[in-house]
């Protein structure tokens, strides 16, 4: 990232990209007291910006801190970053963390910081290419018991096992890794939720120990709008052979069909394609949306 110019919003000020730094004694760096978001702007408008700002504030509260900006202020700051950097199609990364005044597990009075960066991320929508599907491995690490970690926060610390798992998957030639949960149920991928198709119905794990993605909610809504039944339930790995299609969802992944998970095979089909197309239409800025 050292070659990227432009500006980053940092604690209410707009600073050059290179100057948006933190001290090495930052609490967030040592003890993972950080929460973040991943969002995407399409045609200059961030898709579901307010839902992401609300989730950011909620994640901070779960980690016992309060971001000193309102949802409306965060929404405005994100838009400013998009506008000031002239980035109509961008990935947006807000991050909040506990600062560096006190070093120790407890640091209740440390300053809470918020920064927002964005970078160019065009959406290349080639359905034919995407419909080949991606290959996914099975991760060794499992999503932990929600009684052992704040599972529903989008917190930096929860990504440690995701990074390890994704690195291993990529080294083995896979695009991502699917994680089971602490009970051995299918959970999600390292940065995306997962769906399966069987007999025209969609099945997806209950989001009780992993992030219930904003894209996941959007895709469930899009499927229901088409009259497709969506069943949220416990899914065990030994059922995977019974599903015809599989796809993952996330801000970055959008709707991405899957062709393999370890030894299981899927054939991206009509339902995955329909939801890919519907999602692409849904994320367009409302003012330019063409009536169906
Ligand atoms: N699970 C994890 C672990 C993620 O990092 C993400 C991406 N934020 C998701 C699911 C999907 O969430 P969303 O649809 O809100 O991007």
Image (tube, rainbow, N blue to C red):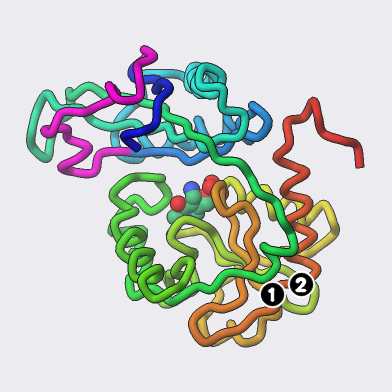
Judge left or right: residue 201 versus residue 145: right
Q: In the rendering, which numbered label is found on residue 245?
A: 1
The image shows residue 42, relative to residue 32, as above or below, that is above
Distance of label 1 from label 2 (alpha carbons): 6 Å
The image shows residue 145, relative to residue 68, as above or below, that is below
The residue carrying pointer 1 sits among few (fewer than 14), some (14 to 19) or many (20 or more) residues within 10 Å by Cα, namely many
Front residue (pair 134, 247): 134
Q: In the rendering, which numbered label is found on residue 44?
A: none
Front residue (pair 254, 48): 254
Image spot of residue 8 (x, y percent)? 39, 23
Image spot of residue 75 (x, y percent)? 53, 22
Residue at x-position 34% and y-position 54%: 159
Tell me the SS state at disc 1. strand
- Whether residue 183 is visible here, answered yes or no, is no
Figure quadrant of residue 97: top left
Residue at x-position 69% and y-position 53%: 219
Residue position marked by numbered label 2 in the rendering: 269
**Residue lying at the far top of the rendered structure:** 13
Q: Please say whether residue 14 is one of the residues in the magenta stretch.
A: yes
Residue at x-position 20% and y-position 40%: 29
Image spot of residue 27 (x, y percent)? 17, 35
Judge left or right: residue 130 versus residue 30: right
**Residue lying at the far right of the rendered structure:** 292
Residue at x-position 30% and y-position 25%: 18
The image shows residue 62, relative to residue 200, as above or below, that is above
Image spot of residue 182 (x, y percent)? 37, 71
Q: Are marks 1 and 2 in contact (CB under 8 Å)?
A: yes
Q: Which residues are magenta?
A: 12-34
């Amino acid at each position: 990232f050292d070659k990227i110019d432009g500006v980053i919003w940092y604690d209410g000020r707009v600073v050059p990209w290179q100057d948006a730094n933190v001290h090495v004694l930052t609490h967030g760096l040592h003890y993972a007291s950080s929460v973040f978001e991943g969002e995407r702007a399409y045609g200059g408008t961030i898709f579901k910006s307010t839902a992401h700002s609300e989730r950011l504030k909620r994640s901070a509260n779960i980690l016992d801190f309060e971001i000193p900006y309102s949802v409306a202020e965060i929404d405005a700051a994100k838009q400013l970053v998009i506008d000031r950097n002239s980035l109509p199609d961008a990935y947006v990364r807000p991050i909040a963390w506990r600062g560096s005044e006190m070093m120790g597990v407890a640091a209740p009075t440390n300053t809470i910081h918020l920064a927002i960066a964005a970078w160019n991320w065009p959406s290349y929508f080639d359905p034919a290419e995407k419909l080949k599907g991606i290959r996914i491995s099975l991760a060794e690490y499992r999503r932990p018991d929600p009684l052992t970690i704040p599972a529903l926060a989008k917190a930096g610390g929860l990504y440690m096992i995701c990074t390890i798992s994704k690195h291993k998957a990529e080294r083995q030639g896979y695009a991502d890794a699917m994680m089971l949960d602490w009970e051995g149920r299918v959970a999600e991928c390292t940065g995306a939720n997962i769906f399966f198709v069987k007999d025209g119905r969609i099945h997806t794990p209950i989001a009780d120990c992993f992030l219930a993605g904003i894209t996941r909610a959007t895709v469930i809504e899009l499927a229901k709008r088409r009259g497709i039944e969506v069943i949220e339930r416990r899914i065990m790995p030994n059922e995977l052979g019974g599903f015809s299609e599989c796809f993952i969802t996330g801000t970055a992944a959008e709707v991405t069909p899957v062709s393999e998970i370890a030894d299981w095979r899927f054939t991206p089909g009509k339902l995955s394609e329909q939801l890919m197309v519907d999602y692409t239409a849904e994320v367009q800025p409302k003012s330019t949306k063409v009536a169906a």
